[in-house]
Image (tube, rainbow, N blue to C red):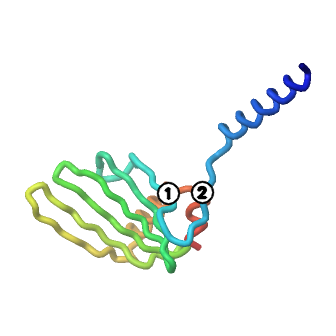
Amino acid sequence: MKLKTLILTGLASVALTACTSAPKIPQLETGVLQEVKNLDVYPDTTNNKAKLTKFSDKCVIEFTGNLKAGKAVEQWSFKSLTLISGGSASFAKDGTSTATNFDLHDATVQKNFLTLRNYFAKEALAQCE
């Protein structure tokens, strides 16, 4: 009877530990590392999300959000802390669209990139080194 109690106690401890430990970010060669939703961004968007994807030579953050006038999509390519490229596209409800490349040397662009980057787990970002 004591052995049965000891085994059940051990199994319960293992189960509790498994449920309370933080999930591990898997190491990937390429693919989606993490996705975050409902970010606090300006301008205000609804149902927004950002996805961090690893490629063989860089990582890309793709942000999408719905504005009152339509949908906005941003893409940021980087390796480690170095921003390689960035741009946005807006898709209006009337069917028109616009696209813009970001000036990577602009301080506001750099700040926006770092702010968005900080929404992701350090373990996921470490794979972009």
Q: Which mark is residue 72?
A: none
Q: Position of residue 112 (x, y in %)?
A: 41, 63
Closer-to-camera residue (124/100): 124
- Residue farthest to the top? 1
Residue wearing tag 2: 25
- Label 1 Cα crowd, 10 Å radius (few <14 / some 14-19 / many 20+): some
Residue 20 at x, y percent in the picture:
67, 38
Q: Height in image: 65 above or below 28?
A: above
Foreground of the two, 54 or 91: 54
Q: Residue at x 12, y 55 (%)?
A: 93
Residue 104 place in picture, x, y as percent: 39, 77
Looking at the image, which residue sits at the far right? 2
**Number of other residues with Cα within 10 Å of mark 2, as a class: few under 14, some 14 to 19, many 20 or more:** some
117 or 9: nearer the viewer: 9
Residue occupying image coordinates x 19% and y 48%: 68
Q: Secondary structure at mark 2?
A: loop
**Residue at x 46% of width, y 75% of height:** 83
**Is 93 situated left or right of 30 in this image?**
left
Q: Which residue is mark 1?
A: 34
Q: Position of residue 57 (x, y in %)?
A: 50, 80
Are the residues flagged by discs 2 and 1 in contact, CB closer than 8 Å?
Answer: yes
Residue 109 occupies quadrant: bottom left
Q: CA distance from mark 2 to mark 1?
A: 8 Å
In which quadrant of the rendered image does the C terminus lie?
bottom right
- Name which residue type carries label 2: Ile
For the N terminus, the image quarter is top right
Q: Secondary structure at mark 1?
A: strand
Name the residue located 57 percent from the left edge and 61 percent from the top edge: 124
